[in-house]
Amino acid sequence: MENLSDLRVIHSILERHGFRFSKALGQNFLVDATVCPRMAELCGADGNTCVLEIGPGIGVLTSELAQRAKKVVAVELDRRLLPVLNETLADFGNVKIVHGDVLELDLAALLRAEFGGDPVVVCANLPYYITTPILMRLLESGLPFEAITVMVQKEVADRLTARPGGKNAGAITVTVDYYAKAQKLFGVSKGAFTPSPKVDSAVIRLTRRAAPPVEVNDPQAFFRLVKAAFAQRRKTAVNSVSATLGIPKPVVADALVACGLDVNVRAEALSTEALAALYRALGGAV
Ligand code: SAM
């Protein structure tokens, strides 16, 4: 098997197939030989576990996953890569490439058809232009992914793995925290890719929680409140929530006080529990 993280090999394969990188599809392929084995080791792939990969590119991570997992299904949107993948992954009988958009595919049906009831993890070097929609789709799907190990932009990794209630936290931190425990695994420099992106990256792992850390009757409404609280970061939470959701300021202020919170608190100082308490105190207003 060819070394798929060798720059010369990559360019020779891609040239043979007349392939040109698409910036619009977030195509930055890994050329650091150490990254994919590490991701594949850390994602939980083993002889009993199946892997869903998103965006296999030319298959550099896919081949590492295939060597460890029971089965790998890799979803690739760019049709031009299908003949490339047929060639680079020809040695593996446990890999299936699915052509499609991960944001559109029926993931439940895919998992049922390909993995039966086997344990499933996600492992991917994500296309950065849709990192958040992909993660939200995976988390909100309710599908039993045991863990999601993904490469994302470093600053997104910092945000996703921040402590809710800490200074790097954002709406996405709290939303992800509702579904999973987020952990940063290791950093990857921009030089590890071709073409090289503008920013460094990091690999993070989201481990699904058995149950949410807070009780809210309507998670989507709760996330709306969280988003509204962070919408105007320079303002206090009361001003940001009131301006974004159109709830009168005194109503929000009273709800904060009822939760024992400072009326001048900023969203980033609110833990997931505090935001859930505020949500409950606002009743049906959100
Ligand atoms: N896994 C390869 C690697 O690490 O070298 C490629 C990673 S590259 C950052 C992202 C990949 O996702 C590209 O192959 C791109 O074509 C694919 N992609 C982009 N948008 C997609 C989508 N909506 N659904 C599935 N794959 C997508």
Image (spheres, grey):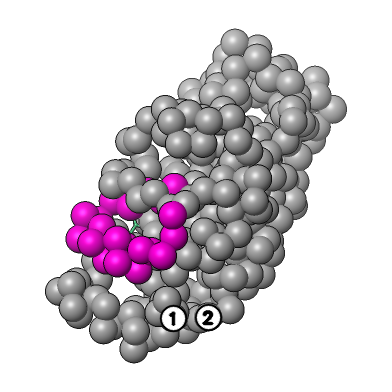
Quarter of the rendering containing residue 159: bottom right
The answer to whether residue 267 shows anywhere in this view is: no
Q: Give the range drawn in magenta.
A: 73-93
Which residue: 21% across, 55% down?
Answer: 79
Work out which quarter of the rendered image holds the N terminus and state it: bottom left
Amino acid identity at mark 2 = Ala
Q: Nearer the viewer, residue 97 or 156?
A: 97
Q: Are marks 2 and 1 in contact (CB under 8 Å)?
A: yes
Check the image and report above or below for 134 versus 253. below
Q: Position of residue 163 (x, y in %)?
A: 74, 51
**Residue depicted at x 80% and y 20%:** 258
Front-most of 109 and 255?
A: 109
* Separation of residues labelled 2 and 1 (CA atoms): 8 Å
Q: Where is residue 18 in the image (x, y as percent from the top left)?
A: 15, 74
Local crowd at mark 2 within 10 Å, few (<14), some, or many (≥20)?
some
Question: Label 1 amino acid?
Answer: Asn
Q: Residue 33 carries which label?
A: 2
Residue 15 percent location from the top left of the image: 20, 80
Q: Quadrant of ligand 1?
A: bottom left
* SS of the residue under disc 2: loop
- Judge whether 12 appears above or below 224 on screen: below
In front: mark 2 or mark 1? 1
Pick out the residue farthest to the bottom. 8
